[in-house]
């Protein structure tokens, strides 16, 4: 906590930061400073005429105080100290001491901005690692309500889970254990990073039981799509599709190569001929790919593919499995395309 001593109109105020904004404004008003916090500069170079001194005792306080410049104000300092107070003191101390921020506004921005992940072609999983974990016992957690909160609030939540939060107190009915011991929870997620926490307060106003959930926002959006029926389920890619995609990619590469040496107009037929592939080959790939996908569909018992060179022959013949509820006259047999 940083101490602030302010003298104005022969009145003196000594207070510690952080403090609730309204309470701090009332204290300042008590000595005649009836102005917004952003107009109270943290220096004696001001137009109002007050005198101000800053007292720092802890390592964190001194690191913060050393970054105060001429036009920084008490509102900025209060916001910064509030954010610092909500985090783990040791972690905050390390981050602030290692920071190269030169002002308190830069420091606040640095502390509240999610860290950037180093660019890599490897899979990155954002999660928590437990030291010498003896066992894991997964349980079904049912999300009764998902709530997005600003990054600053989320950072405070994950650093101090035993604080009381309004979004927990206001949603007590959503958090409980049912007769099958399923945990009914809130899913609180960071609207910036998308990560979140599952919380079952179990009658308390703090996160009594919690679990970190990476990519929580994406999970919620995907679930909402599934419920709305808008989710498109893509079957595994077939071998024919792979070959077709390779040809498309090769065609695009060839066009790009010749475009860089001055050519501007292309026909797909010419490009395919240069790749030793004609429309007949493309048609065969489409036919084979469609047949492979059809074989995986339910209620299709057989798929036959005919040689494209045979005249008056269907390309694909499909046999549908009869529905047991159909009459004999309604039954579907082979369909040719």
Image: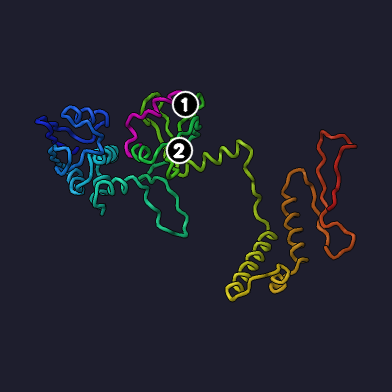
Q: Which residue is mark 2?
A: 137
Q: Residue at x 68, y 70 (%)?
A: 266
In x, y percent, where is residue 172? 43, 24
Q: Is residue 118 left or right of residue 261?
A: left
Q: Secondary structure at mark 1?
A: helix
Q: Quadrant of the N terminus?
A: top left
Q: Residues within 10 Å of mark 2 (few under 14, many from 20)?
A: few
Q: Which range of residues does the magenta coloring cover?
A: 157-173
- As drawn, 293 above or below 143: below
From the viewer's perspective, tell me whether residue 254 is left or right of residue 131.
Answer: right
**Callout 2 touching callout 1 (CB < 8 Å):** no
Return the mark for residue 281: none
Residue furthest to the bottom in view is 261
User: Of helix, strand and loop, which one carries label 2?
Assistant: loop
Q: Is residue 191 above or below residue 239?
A: above
Instruction: Tell me if mark 1 has few (under 14), some (14-19) or many (20+) residues whose alpha carbon lies within 10 angstroms of its own.
Output: many
Report if residue 159 lies within the magenta region.
yes
The foreground one among 265 and 167 is 265
Q: Which residue is mark 1?
A: 174
Residue farthest along the left direction in this orientation: 10
Q: Which residue lies at the image location 81% right of the left edge and 43% below the top edge?
A: 321
Q: Earlier in the sequence, mark 2 or mark 1?
A: 2
Q: Nearer the viewer, residue 137 or 22?
A: 22
Q: Please tell me which residue is depicted at 76% across the width and 58% down the height of the picture.
A: 287
Residue 5 at what x, y percent from top left?
Answer: 13, 36
């Amino acid at each position: 906590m940083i101490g602030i001593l302010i003298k104005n109109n022969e009145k003196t105020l000594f207070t510690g930061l952080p403090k609730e904004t309204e309470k701090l404004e009332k204290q300042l008003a008590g000595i005649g400073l009836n102005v917004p916090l952003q107009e109270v500069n943290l220096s004696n170079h001001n137009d109002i005429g007050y005198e101000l001194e800053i007292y720092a005792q802890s390592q964190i306080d001194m690191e913060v105080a050393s970054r105060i410049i001429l036009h920084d104000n008490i509102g900025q300092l209060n916001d910064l100290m509030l954010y610092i107070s909500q985090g783990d003191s040791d972690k905050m101390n390390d981050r602030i001491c290692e920071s190269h921020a030169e002002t308190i506004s830069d420091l606040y921005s640095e502390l509240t901005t999610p860290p950037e992940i180093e660019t890599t072609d490897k899979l990155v999983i954002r999660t928590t690692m437990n030291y010498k974990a003896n066992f894991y016992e997964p349980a079904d957690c049912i999300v009764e309500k998902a709530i997005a909160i600003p990054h600053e609030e989320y950072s405070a939540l994950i650093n101090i889970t035993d604080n009381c939060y309004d979004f927990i107190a206001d949603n007590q009915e959503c958090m409980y254990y049912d007769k099958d011991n399923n945990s009914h929870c809130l899913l609180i997620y960071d609207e910036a990073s998308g990560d979140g926490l599952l919380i079952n307060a179990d009658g308390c106003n703090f996160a009594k039981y919690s679990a970190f959930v990476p990519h929580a926002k994406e999970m919620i959006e995907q679930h909402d799509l599934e419920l709305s029926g808008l989710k498109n389920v893509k079957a595994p890619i077939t071998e024919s599709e792979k070959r077709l995609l390779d040809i498309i990619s090769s065609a695009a590469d060839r066009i790009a190569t010749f475009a860089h040496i001055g050519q501007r107009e292309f026909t797909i037929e010419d490009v395919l001929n240069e790749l030793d592939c004609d429309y007949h080959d493309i048609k065969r790939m489409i036919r084979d790919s469609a047949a492979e996908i059809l074989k995986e569909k339910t209620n299709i018992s057989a798929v036959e593919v005919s040689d494209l060179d045979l005249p008056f022959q269907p390309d694909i013949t499909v046999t549908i499995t009869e529905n047991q509820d159909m009459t004999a006259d309604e039954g579907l047999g082979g369909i040719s395309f």
